[in-house]
Image (cartoon, rainbow, N blue to C red):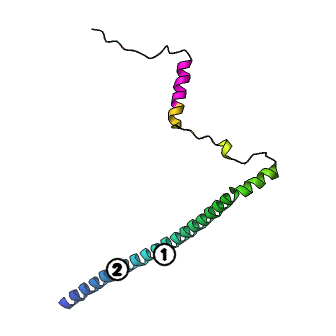
């Protein structure tokens, strides 16, 4: 029995073709899967963008409704409808402070603490030699 080199050469070509087709099929399948994942992600993004636009539109509508309810005409009408008896704000209800209100409150707070009689006056430290 004599073996020829042509059978070995044909076997090598067949194996190379099978490996090439397998590798190419794997690459093709991976490409299709990635394209499918991109399509799913794009569909999800479109749905999220639509939802965001819907929420923004809703927020804009609510903001417009709140702003319309804060107008002075609507507030006066609601005051009359519900018989709340609120008086419209005028200059007599506004008191302008000539000084910084934070410092005034701090001074008043310190004055109330010292007025309780718990503290006899300022604390003095003496250095002993």
Where on the picture, by quarter, is residue 38?
Answer: bottom left
Q: Would you identify the image quadrant in which residue 115 lies?
A: top right
Residue 9 part of the magenta segment: no
The answer to whether residue 4 is seen in the rendering is no
- Residue at 44 percent of width and 17 percent of height: 122
**Could you say where residue 35 lies in the image, as x and y percent from the top left?**
44, 77
In the picture, the quarter occupied by the C terminus is top left
Q: Distance between the residues labelled 2 and 1?
A: 26 Å
Q: Count the labels in the image.
A: 2
Q: Is 12 positioned to the left or the right of 49 in the image?
A: left
Please state if 91 lies on the left or on the right of 103 as rendered. right
Give the percent coordinates (x, y) of residue 59: 61, 61
The percent position of residue 45, horizontal first and vertical second, equals 51, 70
Residue at 79 percent across and 45 percent down: it is: 85
Magenta stretch contains residue 107 = yes
Q: For mark 2, what is the residue?
A: 22
The one nearer the camera, 40 or 10, is 40
Q: Is mark 1 on a helix, strand or loop?
A: helix
Viewer can see residue 69: yes
Please tell me the numbered disc located at residue 39.
1
Viewer-proximal residue, 46 or 112? 112
Residue at figure coordinates x 54%, y 32% from the top left:
105
Q: Give the range drawn in magenta.
A: 106-127
Identify whether 81 is placed above or below 53.
above
Tell whether 121 sits left or right of 86: left
Residue drawn at the location 29% of the way across and 85% of the way down: 17
The quarter of the picture where the N terminus appears is: bottom left
User: In the image as oriented, which residue stretches furthest toward the top?
Assistant: 129
In front of the other: 88 or 12: 88
Q: Relative to 104, does residue 8 appear above or below in the rendering?
A: below
Q: Earlier in the sequence, mark 2 or mark 1?
A: 2
């Amino acid at each position: 029995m004599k073996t020829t080199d042509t059978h070995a050469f044909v076997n090598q070509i067949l194996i190379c073709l099978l490996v090439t087709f397998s590798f190419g099929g794997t690459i093709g399948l991976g490409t299709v899967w990635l394209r499918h994942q991109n399509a799913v992600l794009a569909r999800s993004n479109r749905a999220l963008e639509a939802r965001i636009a819907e929420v923004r539109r809703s927020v804009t509508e609510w903001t417009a409704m709140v702003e319309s309810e804060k107008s002075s005409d609507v507030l006066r009408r609601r005051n009359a409808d519900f018989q709340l008896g609120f008086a419209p704000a005028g200059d007599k209800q506004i008191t302008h402070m000539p000084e910084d209100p934070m410092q005034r409150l701090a001074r008043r707070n310190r004055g109330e603490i010292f007025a309780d009689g718990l503290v006899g006056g300022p604390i003095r430290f003496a250095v002993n030699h």
